[in-house]
Image: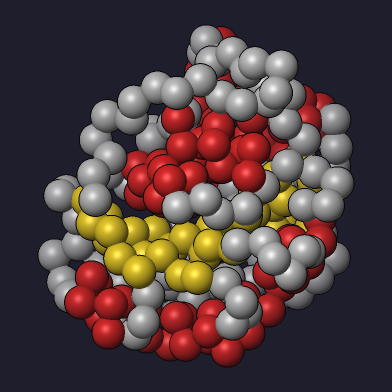
Amino acid sequence: MNEQQKVLIILPAWNESEGLPSVLKEIQTKIPFADALVVDDGSSDDTARVAAEAGANVVRLPYNLGVGGAMRLGYRYAHEHDYDVAIQVDADGQHDPGFVPDLLAALDTVDLAIGARFAGVGDYAVRGPRKLAMGLLSVVLSRIARTKLTDTTSGFRACNRQLIEFFAHWYPVEYLGDTVESMVGAVRCGFTVRQVPVAMRERTTGTPSASPVKAMVYLGRAGFVLMLAMIRRMPERDISGRSPRTSIAGATK
């Protein structure tokens, strides 16, 4: 990483006031060279106030759009404020900021670096139908991206300036759009992807949803999102690699 690069950590947050202070403190401790942006995704608690008091920059959505909508606004912020690198980090404590330098190093050769849970580092595990669904997605997306991917639904990812601009003007907000569809869209437009082994932790706040029925619903939705990603018309890039300047509905500061 060039020491002159501007790095932005984007944290999409929905009712995360309880865990945000410790997450932001860890970011400040482990990666003090990076700025932090909390995107309050229509929270009904004090997420925005807590984030501001912890020293983060804060932008707010008027109502809950989901992770995709929050990240779309985050990329717009990164582009408008001239950041070289944007890194998505969950606000619930699952992502260890200590692995950010590894993601940054990967950007020397690719456009999008994905922090992968199931690549030989750490002991994070999923079971049952959800594991099967994630495995099938990884096989298909590895073929599409022409690189081995073991954790295609990971939200711990970093992208360079060119991809920031692309995502600022095109970013899906549907379910799994922030992971599966955004990656497929980037690959279809010529951006390169690589995974980076990372260790992840159990979330420190909130309650994860997990049941066989929900896992099968997840598989069905994931398949639909993948199909949509493959047939959806993509914006054209000019020869400089820049994406067209189009408006993003629903993104506000």
* Residue ID at (31%, 76%): 51
Number of numbered discs present? 0
Q: Is residue 126 left or right of residue 148?
A: left
Residue lying at the far front in this picture: please name it.
Answer: 4
> 212 or 157: which is nearer to us?
157
Vertical relation: 204 (above or below) 233: below
Q: Give residue 186's position: percent from left, percent from top.
A: 64, 30
Image-based side of 100 in relation to 167, left or right: right
Please state the horizontal and vertical placement of residue 19, each as a whole percent of the image.
Answer: 36, 81
Q: Position of residue 154 (x, y in %)?
A: 61, 53
Quarter occupied by residue 85: bottom right
Q: Residue at x 62, y 53 (%)?
A: 84
Give the quadrant of the N terminus. bottom right
Between 55 and 120, the one nearer to me in the picture: 55
Residue 24 lies in what quarter of the image? bottom left
The color scheme shown is: secondary structure
Residue found 54% across the figure and 37% down from its top:
165
Residue 247 x %, y %: 34, 25
* Vertical order, 225 against 2 (above or below): above
Where on the picture, by quarter, is residue 40? bottom left
Q: Would you say residue 26 is visible in this rendering?
A: yes
Q: Relative to 218, is 227 on the left or the right? A: right
State left or right for residue 106 relative to residue 16: right
